[in-house]
Amino acid sequence: MTTVRTVLGDVAAASLGRVNYHEHLFQASPLLPGDDLDDEGASGVEAGTLRSSGFDSMIDATPIGLGRRPEAVARISESTGLHVVAATGTHRDAHYGPQHPLRRLDGEQRASRYLGDLLVGMPVDDESGREIAPAMTAAGTPIRAGLVKTGIGYWSISEFERETLRAAALAHLETGAPVMVHLEFCTAANEVLDLLEQFGVSPNRVVLAHADRDPNPALHLQLAARGAWLGYDGIARPRIRSEAELLDLTELVVEAGAGDAILLGADVARRSRYVSYGGMPGLGYLGSHYVPRLVERIGVELVDRILTNPQRFLPWSR
């Protein structure tokens, strides 16, 4: 396929332009009390800021059960002109309470949920599930997901997370949809790729989110050599890694020939970090502040190549 599934329908991959590979317009998790993204007006303003900062598209990486609002995302996409690729899938274990309904589903059952989101349409509300009408655009078309989001813990893959990875593999094998895996500080990256390969997913269909939380170019070159995509999304988080470290890492990886494996985002993901919710630095920071600094390091041509890499990652292929 040379098309990408967005919330407003399938589009040519080349029409995505510059892509922010990892953000959230809506999100709610017991791990982030008081930091929910739940206001359509505020999230819409933030998406407009991202658009005006130089991005044409984004991945909304909120999976099942964490506050997805597909109809609101579709309205924001339409009003801002920003292409949005939505996620299905299940996040890492810690985001779901002990009584969460997803814990009662095995890999096959979760895969069925993912396939419904990818092929039929996402439910209006995850809590109500498919018993109610599917989410629809203003034009009356179903709102479908375009990739599968998963996650694991710090140097660990719980049984819940293993079943999620198996479910993601089943959905991928059926559709060719790409897979995103949240890593804690880039730990167990090779182990995740090994497990997904056992389940039939090639590393070149997988992006390792938060790879830059371990700014080890040797590790990143090894992962890229396996075919995996490197998710660099720790921008504006100096308590974890300074931007100087991230710039150094990117420059070294690009100089070593693996720039085509990098996907760039910011994963701002908090009410307290969105300007429109009263926080900072907001979705505009990546394009307005970080990207120009990256251009100074590696040049505009290489930066443009990195920002358009998702055009190769997002089309469905087995």
Image: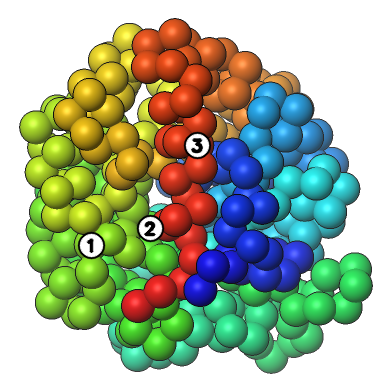
Q: Nearer the viewer, mark 2 or mark 1?
A: 1
Residue 35 visible in this rendered orientation of the protein = no
Identify the residue at image location x=9%, y=32%: 218
Residue 25 location in percent, x, y?
65, 46
Q: CA distance from mark 3 to mark 2?
A: 17 Å
The amino acid at mark 2 is: Met
Placement of 167 over or under 59, stated as above or below: below
Q: Are marks 3 and 2 in contact (CB under 8 Å)?
A: no
Q: CA distance from mark 2 to mark 1?
A: 11 Å
Assign a secondary structure to mark 3.
helix
Identify the residue at image location x=14%, y=55%: 226
Residue 124 location in percent, x, y?
73, 73
Assign a secondary structure to mark 2.
strand
Residue under label 1, please give it: 203
The amino acid at mark 1 is: Pro
Residue under label 2, please give it: 180
Identify the residue at image location x=55%, y=24%: 286
Residue under label 3, please give it: 307
Q: Are marks 2 and 1 in contact (CB under 8 Å)?
A: no
Placement of 233 over or under 288, stated as above or below: below
Q: Mark 3 or mark 2: name the one nearer the start of the chain.
A: 2
Q: 175 left or right of 23? A: left
**Between residues 253 and 214, which one lies in front from this camera angle?**
253
Residue 117 visible in this rendered orientation of the protein = yes
Placement of 266 over or under 160, stated as above or below: above
Dot 2, how many residues are within 10 Å of its Cα: few (below 14), some (14-19), or many (20+)? many
Dot 3, how many residues are within 10 Å of its Cα: few (below 14), some (14-19), or many (20+)? many
Q: 136 left or right of 120? A: right
Identify the residue at image location x=21%, y=55%: 227
Residue at the right extreme, as displayed = 139
